[in-house]
Image (cartoon, coloured by chain):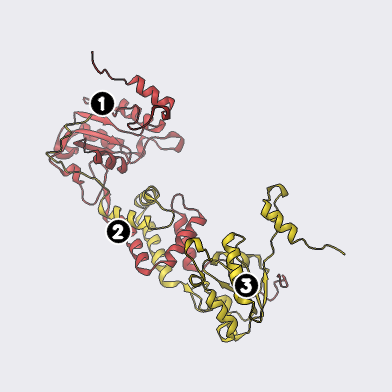
Chain colours: A yellow, B red
Amino acid sequence: MSTKGQNESSPKRSLSYPAPVERLLTELTRLPGIGRRSAERLAFHVLRGDKQAAEKLAHAITDVKSAIGHCSICSNLTEHDPCPICESEKRDRSKILVVEQPRDLIAIEQTAMYQGLYHVLLGRISPLDGIGPEHITARDLLQRIDNPKRNAGGVPIQEVILGMNPTVEGDGTALYLTSQLESRNVRITRLARGLPSGWSMELASKAILADAIEGRQQVRE
Amino acid sequence: MSTKGQNESSPKRSLSYPAPVERLLTELTRLPGIGRRSAERLAFHVLRGDKQAAEKLAHAITDVKSAIGHCSICSNLTEHDPCPICESEKRDRSKILVVEQPRDLIAIEQTAMYQGLYHVLLGRISPLDGIGPEHITARDLLQRIDNPKRNAGGVPIQEVILGMNPTVEGDGTALYLTSQLESRNVRITRLARGLPSGWSMELASKAILADAIEGRQQVRE
């Protein structure tokens, strides 16, 4: 089907999408995990959809930046500073559960089993990724302990519960925080590890079983 | 670590993200291939990034809807109607290469081997997905052939080149278009199939080899 092939007459060529489409593709590929192909799929979805849907998405993006910040006490995502949890007088302000991300906090809140405050690290220490203690909110945590005025309600902290993910990086972060906390007059605990409730034993990895054995609890004397 | 567990005092709980974050998650999960987890990853990226980056993304989304439409002749994506290719007097307006999507058109343009016009179906017939001829721009194509005024520059069409994907749906779509075109006074051709240039033979599937054998070309008499 090839016609001449020589390009001397140079008919108008369309080597890329129209500029607004290319601009959207550029912005979309900046997002994590979005390559050129995914960006095209998303852009075509926006192009096919109605204008209102596109505007709702665009507004949600700009709104989230203008309306959401981090709590100046615990670093959780919040519309109002301090966040509702730090504001609440019904929470036990002498306890802090330290988590990596806001989503971990939400997962724990959903259990309704914890009444204390939180501290969101907004990451974990990961030397391989160049993420050190200075890149997470570790210093803010230490300041909440050293200076009760920095904690919600000015209440002194008695217990720090380490709730990082049970991963190499989570463990490393816990180790770092423990080293920083040891010299301070607080109780340090960590969330229990063991067999995940509802699993069958055969699904458990060696590491899970090792945790389960090491952390075994006495049922009766 | 569980404190009482009874919820009688009901301390302020945070069972989901702040409202603007949830709104963004809702909009993001409407996009194809984006689940709750991916949406969180994208939303946190926006939250971490600077405000300018978020605004560029939001503007790119609204701009693409207001600035981009489909060419009234060939249905390609375009900022101006008709699109630059249909507008160009240097293209051979008697030939139409029919493709499924705008990205296929761009792929062919990048070869600089084709000087005719295009017709973008914006899909392919796929009965299993409930997509019939009425859901693609097949009727527009037939009208361009039946009424030269509907084609760029009012030029009568002499050849229709079928350039659908070499898939079951692409083949089905080609079959449908062929059945519609046969009664019309146009030459019908299709893009060649065979061994993909640069591959080694052993990577070729049975279907590729079958195409290569069936479509073999004489080298010399």
Q: Can you say which quadrant of the picture contains the C terminus of chain A?
A: bottom right
Q: CA distance from mark 3 to mark 1?
A: 75 Å
Question: B159 above or below B55?
Answer: above
Q: Are marks 3 and 2 on the same chain?
A: no
In the image: residue B126, left or right of residue A197? left
> Which residue matches tag 3?
A178
Q: CA distance from mark 2 to mark 1?
A: 39 Å
Chain on which label 2 sits = B
Q: CA distance from mark 3 to mark 2?
A: 50 Å
Q: For mark 2, does the 10 Å Cα neighbourhood hold few (<14), some (14 to 19), or many (20 or more) residues?
A: some
Q: Which residue is painted at 13% across and 39% down in the image?
A: B90
| Dot 3 and dot 1 residues touching (CB under 8 Å) | no
Quadrant in the rendering for residue B177:
top left
Q: For mark 1, does the 10 Å Cα neighbourhood hold few (<14), some (14 to 19), or many (20 or more) residues?
A: some
> Which residue matches tag 2?
B63
Is any part of residue B166 visible from this angle?
A: yes
Q: Secondary structure at mark 2?
A: helix
Return the x and y of residue B197 as percentages of the image width and height. Answer: 32, 31
Q: Amino acid at mark 3?
A: Thr
> Which residue matches tag 1?
B188
**Which sits earlier in the primary sequence, circle 2 or circle 1?**
2
Nearer-the-camera pick, A144 or B43: A144
Q: Secondary structure at mark 3?
A: helix
Q: Are marks 2 and 1 on the same chain?
A: yes
In the image: residue B66, left or right of residue B171? left
Select label 3 or label 2 by which is in front. Answer: 3
Q: For mark 3, does the 10 Å Cα neighbourhood hold few (<14), some (14 to 19), or many (20 or more) residues?
A: some
Q: Amino acid at mark 1?
A: Ile
Chain on which label 3 sits = A
Nearer-the-camera pick, B188 or A174: A174
